[in-house]
Each structure stands twice: as structure tokens, then as C-alpha cells.
Amino acid sequence: MRSARRAPMLRGMSTHLTSYYDGPDLTGRVRDALRQAGLDPARLRVDDLVAMDQCHALGLAGTVALAKLAELRHGERVLDLGAGIGGPARVLVARFGAHVTAVEPTARFRRLAAELNAATGLQGAIEIVDALGHALPFADGSFDLVWTQAVLPNVADVAPLAAEAHRVLAPSGRWALAETVAGPGGAPYFPVPWADDHDASHLLAPEALRTTLERPGFAAEVWEVGSAAVAPAVAELTSEPADPNPPVELGLIMPDRDTRMASLARNIAEQRIAPVLAVLRRAP
Ligand SMILES: C[S@@+](CC[C@H](N)C(=O)[O-])C[C@H]1O[C@@H](n2cnc3c(N)ncnc32)[C@H](O)[C@@H]1O
């Protein structure tokens, strides 16, 4: 880890972080699984990890599709907000040549992210920072691209986070996001991959989310909801099929993944939730 900073001051409505992601340390479990798969946990390829470390429903294909949609260029400064164990950050560095600052408030995710960054030789290109989205410890205009995947359903009040995303972006910078919104079909079934119950889940309807995100001074250049939001990832999967027998999988990080993914699928089928894919442009 190049550095691990704590936001000097927490501003905004609430400093609350869901405890849902807390739990036992993950580093030993992942090291053991990698050894069992015949890999050296200290020397890994980014692609060895992608079936485990993309902690969102669309996996590697979703990350690659979003980066292409955002027209991510070599050398751009990316703020990955809610970076998890750093899988998307590693892909953005390894495949797109980005410099990534990975903000992640959950300590055990930061620890594993740092270990995997070092094992893949990417620790110099990814800075891990302990902070929350509504109080970012960065100067105005520090980034070219803000990136969120599967984070906003954990945020009770998205408005302060959107204001911070706007503040830390350079003029004309972009915010690329792949998130989940509420659908017209009624309350979701739980548990889902981001929450055990209704109290910890904060889904907005698509137009309410769009209005909240655009308010600080963004304009949506891409805004797709439902099957159109998934189509770019499906196209990626067609050109680069997922490894049918990966060395490590998401179940290591989320042991009851199958239960949570099943309710996710049922919620989508019954239009209780929907995926949203967007690229927002900050005003010049
Ligand atoms: C479902 S995980 C997604 C991780 C990562 N974006 C990915 O796709 O692999 C959601 C992450 O958001 C983080 N998170 C939750 N609330 C947050 C907040 N207010 N600010 C920043 N990160 C937050 C959690 O700690 C967790 O790592």
C-alpha cells in the first residue's frame, strides 16, 4: 500500500457506514485458496483474480464495458469510490493504464486489496485511502474520472456523495457508474448482495437517482436502465467469455453468494429492482 489515509474531517449528513461488510480477515482465506489452486499468493496475474474480486453482479465484463463506455484513457486519474477488494481498480490499471485512487472504508477489504495489489505488482499505480464518499480527503479537481460500481445502494443519502464527486473532478471530468435502482414491482426480497434487509438498503427510483446525481452540476451523457444497462457487459462476455474454472471465486468473499444472487435475479425478474449504467459529465 503506498499510503492509507483517513479523511481528516468527516463532513456532511452522516458518517454512518453499514456494518454489513465487516467480518473476519480475508487475507488468510484467499491465500489458502490460491495455494490450493496451484498459485503463488505473492505473485499473481490480475486475470487470476477476476472471478473473485469484481464484487458486483456483472463481473469483469461489466468493469471492462463501463471503462470503454467512459472512454477511459491511458494515464487518466481515476477515483474508485467504494473500491472493495480492489478488483476493478486493478483492471483499470492493467488493461487501461489508469492511475487509481481506491477509496474504501471497510478495513478488511483495504487489507486484502493492498495484498493483492502487491502480488500483482500494481501497488505503485493504486493508492488505497480510508474514507467515505461524502467526505473525500482530496483537493478540488484532483481526478479525471470518478467510478462507482455497486456502492450507492449502501448510501442512505447520495446527495453529499454526489457533491463530493463533483468537487474532486476536474472541469469536464466524468462519473462512470453501474448501480441498482428501485423498480415498480414492489419492495425487494432480501438478502441481496449489498444488504441483509430493507433497513440497510437505500434504492432510489431511476429518475430520483438521476436528479440527485445531476444536481451538483453533472449532465448524463449515458443513462441506461434495465436490459439496456446490461447490454454492453453481455457484448463484452461474448468477445471474452468468463473462465469456466477460475482459481478463486466471489464465494470466498461472500460465502452465501448463491442465496443473495438468487434473490437478486428474482428481484430483477419481478421488476423490484433494475440495473442502471451511466456516464455523467461535469460542467466545464
Ligand atoms: C458491493 S461492494 C462493491 C465493491 C467494488 N466497487 C466492486 O465493484 O468490486 C460496495 C463497497 O462500497 C463500500 N461503501 C459502502 N458505503 C460507502 C460509502 N459511503 N463511501 C464509500 N464506500 C462505501 C463498501 O465498503 C464496499 O466495499
Image: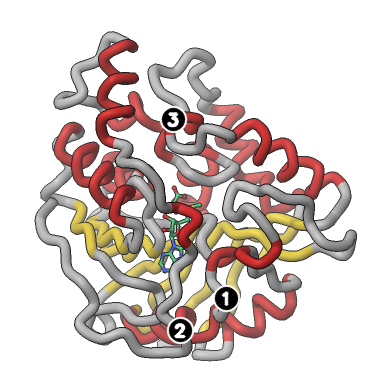
**Viewer-proximal residue, 63 or 194?**
194
List the residue tagged with mark 2. Answer: 14
Count of numbered marks: 3
Q: Which residue is mark 3?
A: 252
Q: Quadrant of residue 17?
A: bottom left
According to the image, what is the colour scheme of the structure?
A: secondary structure
**On screen, residue 243 above or below 172:** above
Q: Which residue is mark 1?
A: 156
Q: Amino acid at mark 1?
A: Ala
Q: Amino acid at mark 2?
A: Ser
Q: Is mark 3 within 8 Å of ligand 1?
A: no
Name the residue located 29 percent from the left edge and 55 percent from the top edge. Answer: 107
Q: Residue at x 78, y 51 (%)?
A: 189
Determine the residue located farthest toward the front in the rendered image.
Answer: 24
Q: Earlier in the sequence, mark 3 or mark 2?
A: 2
Image-based side of 273 in relation to 64, left or right:
right
Where is residue 87 shown, x and y percent of the image?
36, 42
